[in-house]
Amino acid sequence: MPAGGRGPRPPVQEETIRSEKIQVERKTFLLILKENARGRFLRITEDVGGRRDSIIVPTSGLEEFRNAVDAMLQAAQELPPHPGEPPSESIAD
């Protein structure tokens, strides 16, 4: 039994609301909007050669998350191109 005296957690029923797949260089990103008894959330999974890492963002934080990504995109677009980086596609507003 794991520390704390609790056994494994029972599986949680999750419903997929929407999903998107993005391929960037050798990485695949899966964005899946889901819902369970605790609420709605976005699961972002990075798959690199079969190795997966995920983060979960509750929908209550998606606007703040988007604002942070927008700020990073703006900062990246203001920098000169990196010598080892392939050219990026422009994103039109």
Image (tube, rainbow, N blue to C red):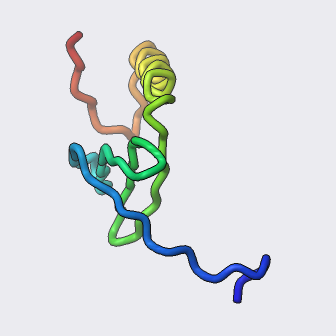
Q: Residue furthest right?
A: 4
Q: Quadrant of residue 80?
A: top left
Rendered view: 40 above or below 60:
below
Q: Quadrant of residue 49?
A: bottom left
Q: Quadrant of residue 39?
A: top left
Please state which of residues 48 and 4 is positioned toward the viewer in this rendering: 4
Could you tell me which quadrant the C terminus lies in?
top left
Image location (x, y in percent) of residue 67: 47, 18
Residue 76 visible in the current orientation: no
Could you tell me which quadrant the N terminus lies in?
bottom right
Image location (x, y in percent) of residue 75: 48, 17
Query: Is 9 on the left or on the right of 69, as rendered?
Result: right
- Residue at x 28% of width, y 54% of height: 15
- Residue at x 70% of width, y 79% of height: 6
Image location (x, y in percent) of residue 88: 27, 30
Q: Residue furthest top?
A: 93
Q: Residue furthest bottom?
A: 1
Query: Is 49 on the left or on the right of 23, as rendered?
Result: right
Q: Residue furthest front?
A: 37
Image location (x, y in percent) of residue 54: 46, 56
Please state which of residues 20 and 27 is positioned toward the viewer in this rendering: 20
Rendered view: 50 above or below 64:
below
- Residue at x 64% of width, y 83% of height: 7
